[in-house]
Image (cartoon, rainbow, N blue to C red):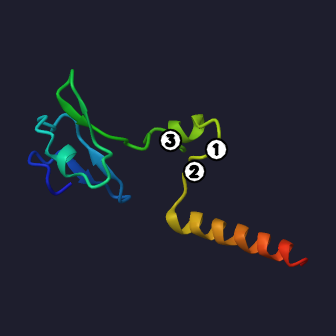
């Protein structure tokens, strides 16, 4: 976000990092510096592209379409709590409780 020389990448009020493709000049500096490798290059439009979490949907399309249920869309604290709860339940079962 800080490497974007055109100001196309910003954090919205919800804390989600968004890309304004109208402002993107296609320098792809963001692609080179992204530590997670989630920003790609749209070669025909000469713009950077990345997941925008489908802002028009309650759940991103990739999560809805995942055939194995491997993708989840929750906050980190909610997800961590569910994992801890599941682990606790499994431990209780294993101990006969």
Residue 77 at x, y percent in the picture = 53, 69
Q: Is residue 64 left or right of residue 33?
A: right
Circle 1 sits in a helix, a strand or a loop, which is it? loop
Circle 3 sits in a helix, a strand or a loop, which is it? loop
Identify the image quadrant of the C terminus. Answer: bottom right
Residue closest to the far front: 94
Mark 2 vs 1: CB contact within 8 A = yes
Report crowding for label 3: few under 14, some 14 to 19, many 20 or more residues within 10 A (C-alpha): some
Circle 2 sits in a helix, a strand or a loop, which is it? loop
Q: Looking at the image, is mark 2 or mark 3 earlier in the sequence?
A: 3
Q: Quadrant of residue 93?
A: bottom right
Residue linked to disc 3 = 60
Disc 2 from disc 3: Cα separation: 9 Å
Report crowding for label 1: few under 14, some 14 to 19, many 20 or more residues within 10 A (C-alpha): few
Q: Foreground: 91 or 80?
A: 91
User: Given this view, does label 2 or label 3 mark the residue nearer the observer?
Assistant: 2
Residue linked to disc 1 = 69
55 to 42, vertically: above or below: below
Residue linked to disc 2 = 72
């Amino acid at each position: 976000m800080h490497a974007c020389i055109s100001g196309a990448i910003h954090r919205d009020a919800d804390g989600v990092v968004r890309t304004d493709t109208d402002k993107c000049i296609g320098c792809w500096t963001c692609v080179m510096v992204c530590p997670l490798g989630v920003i790609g290059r749209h070669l025909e439009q000469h713009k950077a592209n990345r997941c925008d979490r489908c802002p028009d949907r309650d759940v991103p399309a990739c999560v809805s379409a995942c055939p194995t249920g491997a993708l989840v869309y929750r906050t980190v604290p909610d997800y961590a709590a569910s994992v801890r709860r599941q682990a606790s339940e499994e431990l209780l079962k294993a101990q006969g409780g």
